[in-house]
Amino acid sequence: MELDKPEVFLKKLSGAVDQLVDDKWWIDRDTIRAKLEAENTH
């Protein structure tokens, strides 16, 4: 599962969660993803 590689594991986890919620998020996931990407570029 490559648990020691967050860049791989988190993408897989995100895909699994997407399937579970069937695109009916109660939060704005795109805003959160954008914020995380901005923080990781610094």
Image: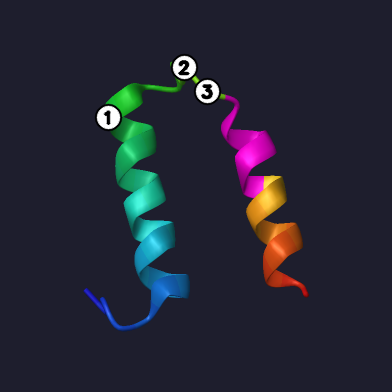
Name which residue lies at 44% across and 16% down.
24
For label 2, the residue is: 26
Which residue type carries mark 1?
Answer: Leu
- Please identify the quadrant where the N terminus is shown: bottom left
Nearest to N terminus: mark 1 or mark 3 = 1
The image quadrant that residue 12 belongs to is bottom left
Q: Amino acid at mark 3?
A: Ile
> What's the magenta region?
28-33
Q: CA distance from mark 1 to mark 3?
A: 15 Å
Q: Residues within 10 Å of mark 3 (few under 14, many from 20)?
A: few
| Label 3: element kind | loop
Cα separation between marks 1 and 2: 13 Å
The residue to which callout 3 is attached is 27
**SS assignment at label 1:** helix
**Secondary element at tag 2:** loop
Q: Which of the colour schemes (rainbow, by chain, secondary structure, one colour) is used?
A: rainbow
